[in-house]
Amino acid sequence: MGRVNALAPNDPSGNDPSGTGRSDAPDPLAGFRALRTPEGAALLAELRDHDPAQELATATRLRRTHAAALVSAALGQARLRQRAVAKFGAEDAYRMYFTPNGVEQATRTSVAAHRAGRFAAGGVRRVADLCCGIGGDAIELARAGISVLAVDRDPLTAEVARANAAALGLDGLIEVRCADVAAVDTSSCDAVFVDPARRGGRGRIFDPEAYSPPLSWAVGAALAAPRAALKIAPGIPHEAIPEQAEAEWISDGGDVKEAVLWFGEGFTPGAHRATLLPAAATLWSGAPLPTPPVGPVGRYLYEPDGAVIRAHLVADLVARCEGRLIDETIAYITADRPYASPYTTGYEITDRLPFNMKKLKALLRERKVGVLTVKKRGSAVEPEELRRRMKLQGPNSATVFLTRVAGAPTMLVGHPLTGPTG
C-alpha cells in the first residue's frame, strides 16, 4: 500500500500535517477520530458531491454550525475521497478514509485483487502485510478469503487502516498492528507481502536501497517466509532483481502500475511475467529470450504493452507475429501480416517519411487530417508542438509515429487496426 510510517516526523505527509514541527500543530489522530463521530460522519455524507471550486463558501457555511477544525478535516477528507474514486471506485472510496500519502501510494483495487488472487490460488491462508499503509492491499487479501496481519508504524496510518477494515466489514479478517515491521513476528503467517515506501520528502525514490525499508531488508523478509510478494517500482533495473524471484510487471488499462517480486513455493525463480488487466492476460518466459531480428518497416506496426516492454518480453511477441524490430533500440514491431494479440496495439502503416516537418504537413493536408494522434519512441519532438505546427484541418484522422528506423529519424503514418485480424 505504500509505507507512510517511515517518513521524517515533520514530513507533511506524516505525523505533522503542518510540516512546521511546531508543538502546537493540530493532532492528526484527534482530527481523524472526530471524523468518525456521528457529527463527522454526517458532515462527510453532506460533502460527498461537493464542488472543490466552492470550498470557501462551503467552509464558511458549515462553520456556522460546526467547529472550524472539524469542518477543515471533513473538507480535506472529502477531497481525498474524490481523488480515491479513480483507484478504489465510488462504492468503496466514499466509505473509506484516506491520508494524502495513502491516496498517492495506494495500489489500484484491480491490481491488488490480482495479487491477492495469486496468493489465494497458491493456498495461502494468512498474510503479513508489512508497510500496509491505509489498508488497500489488506482489503483485497481479505476479500479473497485470506486473513491479514496488517502492520504500519505510523499511528495515524494504522488507525486509518483499522477504520477502513471496519467500514468495509472486513475487520474480522484484518488485524491492524501499529509497530515497526522489523520487530514483528510473522511466523503465524504462511506468506508475507511488503510494500516499501518509494517516495520521500523530495518526491519519488529511484534507488531501491533508499526505499523504506530498503529493498535488501524486504528481500530478506521475503526469503524467510514460505511465500512472499514484494511490490517495487516498475522501472527497477533488471540487474537489481534477486535471482530467487519471479518478476511480474502489471499494467491496467494500458498503463504500467507496478512490478512484483514473487518468492517461494509455486513461483519460478528467474521468470519474467507481464500481466495485463482487466483482461488478466499473462505473457511469461522462464529463460532469457534470443535477440529479435531487425528489418525494414512492413505493412503493419505493433506497439507492445508497457508491461511487456518492462518485462523484456518483446522478443516473444516478435516471434509470435513472425515480425521484426524496426530498430534494435526501439520497441516497435513490424510485420507483413496482421496479428491479433492482447499484448499489442496494431496499426496499418500507409506512409514512411524521413523526419521532415514540411513533408508531414503536406501529407496531412493532402489526406485532410484534422485529428492526429502522435506517438513517439526515440524522438525528442513533443507531440503538442508537432500538432501545433501541422495546423490540422479536415474530417479524417491519422496516427504518426516519431521514431527511428535502422538508426535514422523517421515518421510513420497510419491508422489503428480495428476488429479481428486473424
Image (tube, helix red, strand yellow):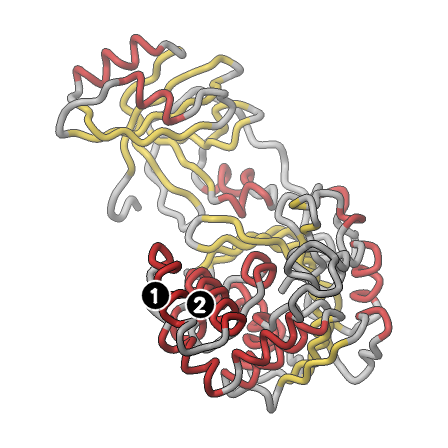
For label 2, the crowd category at 10 Å Cα-Cα, with few meaning under 14, some 14 to 19 and many 20 or more, is: many
- Considering the image in quadrants, where does the N terminus appear? bottom right
Left of 214 or right of it: where is 311? left
Q: Quadrant of residue 42?
A: bottom left
Q: Amino acid at mark 1?
A: His
What whole-number distance in Å separates the C-alpha atoms at marks 1 and 2? 8 Å
Q: Secondary structure at mark 1?
A: loop
Q: Which residue is mark 2?
A: 78
* Residue that appears at 56% across and 77% down: 139
Circles 1 and 2 in contact, beta carbons < 8 Å: yes
For label 1, the crowd category at 10 Å Cα-Cα, with few meaning under 14, some 14 to 19 and many 20 or more, is: some
Q: Residue furthest left?
A: 395
Instruction: Residue 347 in the image: state x and y as whole percent.
Output: 32, 34
Question: Which of marks 2 and 1 precedes in the sequence?
Answer: 1
Residue 316 is tagged as none
Q: Amino acid at mark 2?
A: Ala
* Residue that appears at 66% across and 81% down: 148
* Residue that appears at 73% across and 72% down: 192
Q: Residue furthest front?
A: 64
Q: Secondary structure at mark 2?
A: helix
Q: Closer to the camera, 233 or 73? A: 73
Instruction: Residue 18 in the image: state x and y as whole percent.
Output: 65, 58
